[in-house]
Every structure is written in structure tokens, then in C-alpha cells.
Amino acid sequence: MSVIKVDHLTKDYGNHRGVFDVSFEIEKGEVFGFLGPNGSGKTTTIRNILGFLKPDSGKTYIEGVEVWNNTHITNKDVGYIPGEINFPDKIKGVDLVKWLMEFNNCKNLSKMNMLVELLQLNNVDNLIKKMSKGMKQKLGIVCAFSHDPNILILDEPSSGLDPLMQDRFTNLLKNEKEKGKTVLLSSHIFSEVEKTCDRVAIIKQGEIVALFYMDEIRNPKNKVFLVKFNGIGESNKIIQEALTFDEISHATNTVSIRVANENIKQLLAILSAYEIEFISEIKLTLEDYFMKFYSVEGDK
């Protein structure tokens, strides 16, 4: 049984704003990436999963229990970081964390203390209104993780963190994954998703346009090689070969060749007959794959 299930979810705000017939499932121990620009429907989906919004149609489930009207059951083992953190100002950070831990029946402060040290949240004893945006983001992480939940729903969790803290947060996610935690991660930081996620869904204008395993990006069935020739005119000659070319530039005497993994030796045998300056693999990144679904115009 999946830990999180979104079943044909629709929440329509009009003018094609919202989410439409969205479905996916997240298995126990899986880190699931959820990608899309602002306004694409990520936060609306997450709010429905948590029961903050009532679907127009479709349902969401946590551990087999329908969320709507049952959040007292479904959310008891969930840690959540919202996309926009809005804490009460007139309370100390440490008191807020302890109150949330008590609410979740957790009295062990060891994880809270570890997180405060890891994230260098040195002013956790200060009033929240005196904290910077980055410090409030760190506090949000501490609040979500301190009661040691088995399910983590994270909406842009490392937003506003400096690169060092982003790296520490990535390592924290890896450690939680090793403990068997189930994570839904919405993030604009592609490297964070690449390093931690098992599967990824891409949402565009409220609809899922891709759902894939990260191994398909890390270890694709086909590779692309950029080849630059020394010999004049060899880029003209190579195109007579039975190869698949992504790009050809006679001006720079280069070609990009796409080849299945099992045919790489055959490619190298063909290239051995040419005078080559260099050959390098063009690796597909998650960002490259994501941008296939989003043009510069019309996707704000």
C-alpha cells in the first residue's frame, strides 16, 4: 500500500488555474520529487494532500485513509514545511518547536538539539520576529523534523538557505531516507532533487506532464557524445555513416552523436577511422529534461 496517494485530484480556481486530474502514489521509504514553476499547481496539490483544501473531485490518501475530514488521523505522523513560512512573531523559536513537539506527543529533545546544531540556528532562543528569513527557514526545518515523523511533506524547504546550509539539508534528507522515511519534496533546486529523489513528477499548468525514475536521468539508455575532428571536412564525411546525429556544425567541425549504450563500442570503431581532436559525453541533467516541458514564453 502506498503511503501517499493522489487519485484524480481536481481543484479548479477558474481560468485554468488549479490542478486537474492529478494522480500519483508515493511508496514507503521513497523520496518523491515534485517539480514545476510558481503557479503550476505544486502547492495546491500539497495543500490537498494535507487536507487544507477540499478537492472539487478526486481524493487524497495518507496511509490508506482519505485525508478530507480525517486530518486528525492522517496528519499525526507528518512533518510539513510550507512554501511560505508565516510563524507567530511574539514567541521564541525554541518554545515554538517544543510546543509542536508536545502537540505531536514527542518529549525527546535530542533530534531538535541535533538539528539546531546542524543548521547553526544560534538564535533559536530569540523571538521569531527578530529572526531573518534564512533563520526562519531553518526554524521551519527544525519544526518539521524534530518530532521524528515517518512522513515528510516539504514545499521548497531549502528556500533562502545559503549553499552550505543547502548541502547540509540535502545530507539530512539522505539520512532520513536511509531510516525509511517517506518524503514528498517540492523544490526549485535541481541538484537537491537529483541527489535525493527516487522518482520525479513534473507538473505544468495543473497537469502532470512527466513521471519518471531519477535513474532514467542518471543512467540513460542512450548517450550523446560531442566529437570534434582535426581533419578538414571530416564533419561532412561522418554524416554518411549510419549514426544518429543530434547536431552538426561544419563551421566548427563538430557533431553530436546519440547512441544506445550497447552500441558504444561500434561507435568507437567507426570513429577510429577519423582524425579526432576530442570526444566528450554530453550528460543529460534533470534541469535539461525539465526544460523540455517549459518554453521561455508563456510559462511564468
Image (cartoon, rainbow, N blue to C red):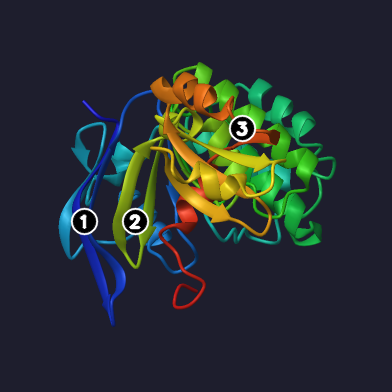
Q: Which residue is mark 1?
A: 9
The residue carrying pointer 2 sits among few (fewer than 14), some (14 to 19) or many (20 or more) residues within 10 Å by Cα, namely many
Indicate the secondary structure of the residue bearing disc 2.
helix
Q: Position of residue 157 (x, y in %)?
A: 59, 47
Q: Are marks 3 and 1 in contact (CB under 8 Å)?
A: no
Which numbered disc covers residue 51? Answer: none
Q: Position of residue 36 (x, y in %)?
A: 45, 58
Q: Which residue is mark 2?
A: 45
Q: Quadrant of the N terminus?
A: top left
Query: Up-down: is 275 above or below 210?
Result: above
Indicate the secondary structure of the residue bearing disc 1.
strand
Is residue 287 left or right of 4 when viewed as pictured? Answer: right
Dot 2 amino acid type: Thr
Q: Residue at x 81, y 60 (%)?
A: 130
Q: Which residue is mark 3?
A: 274
Residue that sits furthest to the left in the current view: 57
Dot 3 amino acid type: Tyr
Q: CA distance from mark 1 to mark 2?
A: 8 Å
> Sequence-wise, which precedes: disc 3 or disc 1?
1
The residue carrying pointer 1 sits among few (fewer than 14), some (14 to 19) or many (20 or more) residues within 10 Å by Cα, namely many
Query: Up-down: is 48 above or below 242?
Result: below
Dot 1 amino acid type: Leu
Q: Residue at x 58, y 48 (%)?
A: 235
Residue 42: which quarter of the image? bottom left
Q: Are marks 1 and 2 in contact (CB under 8 Å)?
A: yes
Query: Up-down: is 168 above or below 15?
Result: above
Q: CA distance from mark 3 to mark 1?
A: 56 Å
Residue 167 in view of the camera: yes
